[in-house]
């Protein structure tokens, strides 16, 4: 088995890696918070959240707060499991001498 088998291509981009990292340690994060934390543009963040949603690694909840749209993102159980596998694979790769 190759040392890189569990490295997940969905997490290849730094924005997706950042989104999942935030969602692994928080119950949820809204669009504005993710945008600020990751230094992403609206379009960039939207396209990467869409890719994670398509893979079923995150779920999206849209609502209105004081008549303003609010979008929240949550890591799914599958997303959490796949991200943990990805991080473990990276750690093994880094520690391989």
Image: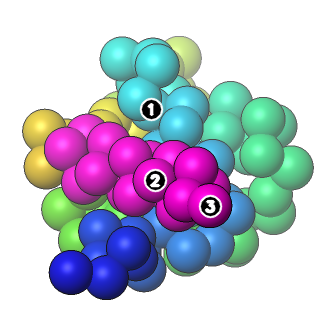
The residue that disc 1 covers is: 23
Which picture quadrant has residue 72? Answer: top left
**Numbered disc in front, either 3 or 2:** 3
In the image, residue 78 lies in the stretch drawn in magenta: no
Density class for disc 2 (Cα within 10 Å; few <14, some 14-19, many ≥20) is: few
In the image, residue 95 lies in the stretch drawn in magenta: yes
Q: Quadrant of the C terminus?
A: bottom right
Residue at 21%, 81% in the rendered image: 1
Q: Position of residue 4 (x, y in %)?
A: 40, 77
Q: Secondary structure at mark 3?
A: loop
Mark 3 or mark 2: which comes first in sequence?
2
The reply to whether residue 89 is in sight is: yes
- Please name whichever residue, 21 or 54, is drawn nearer the observer in this view of the structure: 21
In this picture, residue 40 sits left or right of residue 27: right
Question: What is the spatial separation of the Cα atoms under label 1 and label 3, in whole angstroms?
Answer: 31 Å
The reply to whether residue 64 is in sight is: no
In this picture, residue 77 sits left or right of residue 37: left
**Numbered disc in front, either 1 or 3:** 3
Q: Position of residue 57 (x, y in %)?
A: 26, 55
Query: What is the number of the mark on residue 97?
Result: 3
Q: Which residue, as the protein is rendered here, is positioned at the far front?
A: 97
**Numbered disc in front, either 1 or 2:** 2
Q: Secondary structure at mark 2?
A: helix
Q: Position of residue 28 (x, y in %)?
A: 41, 24
The residue that disc 2 covers is: 92
Density class for disc 3 (Cα within 10 Å; few <14, some 14-19, many ≥20) is: few
Magenta span: predominant SS is helix
Question: What is the spatial separation of the Cα atoms under label 1 and label 2, in whole angstroms?
Answer: 23 Å
Identify the magenta region: 79-97
Query: What is the number of the mark on residue 56?
Result: none
Q: Is residue 96 above or below residue 51?
A: above
């Amino acid at each position: 088995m190759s040392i890189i088998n569990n490295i997940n291509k969905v997490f290849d981009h730094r924005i997706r890696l950042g989104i999942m990292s935030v969602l692994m340690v928080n119950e949820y994060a809204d669009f504005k918070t993710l945008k600020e934390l990751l230094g992403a543009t609206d379009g960039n963040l939207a396209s990467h959240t869409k890719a994670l949603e398509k893979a079923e690694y995150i779920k999206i909840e849209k609502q209105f707060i004081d008549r303003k749209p609010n979008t929240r993102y949550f890591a799914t159980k599958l997303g959490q499991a796949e991200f943990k596998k990805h991080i473990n694979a990276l750690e093994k790769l880094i520690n391989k001498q």
